[in-house]
Amino acid sequence: MVATMDIATADGVVRGRRGRRVLRWRSIPYAAPPIGDLRFRAPQPVEPWSGVRAATDFTSAAMQHRSGARIGPRAYQPTSEDALTLNVTVPATQAASPRPVLVFIHGGGYLIGTSALGLYSGARLALRGDVVVVSLNYRLGAFGYVDFSEFGTAQEPFDSNLGLRDQLAALEWVRTNIAAFGGDPGNVTIFGESAGAHAVLGLLATPKAKGLFHQAISQSPPADWAVTAEEARGFARRCVAALGATPDTAHTALRTAGANDIRRAVDRTIGQVVREQPGAFPVCPVVDGEFLPVSPVDAITDGSAHRVPLIIGTNRDEGTLFARFADELPTTPDRLRSALGNSTEAESRIAAAYPGYPQPKAAVRAGGDYTFWRPSVTVMEGHSRHAPTYAYRYDFAPRALQLAGIGATHATDLVPVFGVTDTPIGRAFTAAGGRRGLRAVTEQFQDNWLAFARTGTPLPSWPAYTEARRSTLIIDYPTRVEHDPDREKRLAWQGVRVPTLT
């Protein structure tokens, strides 16, 4: 289908790079740079260009702390407000018919991350499945997930849910342009991990995303993250104060302040809120009643979300990564107690389901389950009432991760999904053994993900999730199916929701 590196998009011609086995186009703009008058505005159309635009190298990552855009041991991608770009990877061979399209949304807590990370290249996935892989940047943190709309004016308004709107704009670009790259705009699967997995659920709940994707995969989502319009306003006011502005001067300050000054003010405020209210997270989509009418988890439960096939799952040891490196989740008894609203009844019920609690290992497991598994079960239950749903748990942990004390922790599933077994990160994972297991798990992940992207169903060995049986694929070496795994823990978490911001 694609024989040239020069592709005519609706906005102009882009020139990619030919690799040994794949063709790549990098940092193609899907929206106008959100700078100047477009700061804090919904994404606007790209200004068409004449001639050929080079799309051979990555440009900038979205605004974030420098450490979040690290793409190598001593390599950092530049950051900029001008980062609304996407990347396309396709096999170099000709295809007889349009290829299925997988669109990846990176994680990073809606604060950090970049589609330029080598792990996300998608080349191995594209080759194994004969598919087109797209990855994208979207606005993060202060510029994507803080609702400053209260401080806009009639002449110069500010919009809400900018990161979610960016993701929608990228999917609109895919619908318009992906056929030129050999992709099938009628068969698009969105997939993401962590905050990217939450973004998948957010798009499921966004009315304007209807028809832009046909399958969805959500890997380790903090599924019930969302803030009300009132909570969003309160948080934005605190950010404005941290910037040194007042309500009267906020509009001018937000329009003219340096990007890093705004980012630092918001990052400081996030830290304060997370310490004050463990379990809550203020930088996420806002239920504004219009673009996002209800929270993702509520839309999925009440059936108003898009009724497309969904794969959703979590990792067995989600919390260990955060307890070791980003100690912000409710992975201690005090924080979990606060997240539960100081309910002694809920705490005792949950403690009984985690043998050894409140010892650190059990507390970390409970905190990880609270953040990721607990709300994902709600999504499994709710979506399965309205559309095909497939649940998994990732248990595989090679010996190196076991010795490190983190096990099958958050984000380790990305290694087999992207098939990087024979890269430095894959070799590090299996330095103490487990290479054969990792290869087998990689086949399980990729074969299921690719079958799902092609047909809307994974391999026949993976039964659909229903509330009656709760069939769950346990991805391990070997992989197996369990019905209602961790039933006691599931029952203990019933009725628990992420706390509101105070």
Image: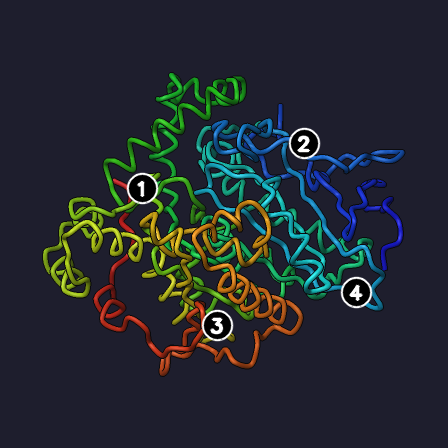
CA distance separating discs 4 and 3: 26 Å
Which sits earlier in the primary sequence, circle 1 or circle 4? 4
Image check: 431 left or right of 417? left
Q: Which residue is found at the position 37% from the left and 82% from the top?
A: 469
Three-letter residue code for mark 2: Thr
Question: Mark 1: few, some, or many residues within 10 Å (few <14, many ≥20)?
Answer: few
The mark that comes first in sequence, 3 or 1, is 1
Write down the residue under mark 1: 324
Task: Identify the residue position indicated by label 2 in the image.
Answer: 59
The image position of residue 488, as x and y in percent, is 22, 71
Vertical placement of residue 403 versus 250, above or below: below
Query: For the point 48% across and 80% down, which residue is it?
Result: 463
On-image quarter of the N terminus? bottom right
Task: Left or right? Give the position of 6 relative to 454.
Answer: right
Q: Circle 3 sits on which residue?
A: 390
Q: Are marks 4 and 3 in contact (CB under 8 Å)?
A: no
- Residue 65 showing in the rendered view: yes
The answer to which of marks 4 and 2 sits earlier in the sequence is 2
Q: Secondary structure at mark 3?
A: strand
Residue 396 versus residue 445: which sits nearer the camera? 396
User: What's the residue type where badge 1 is placed?
Assistant: Arg
Task: Give the residue at x 59% y 58%.
Answer: 190
| Cα gap from disc 1 to disc 4, whole angstroms | 44 Å
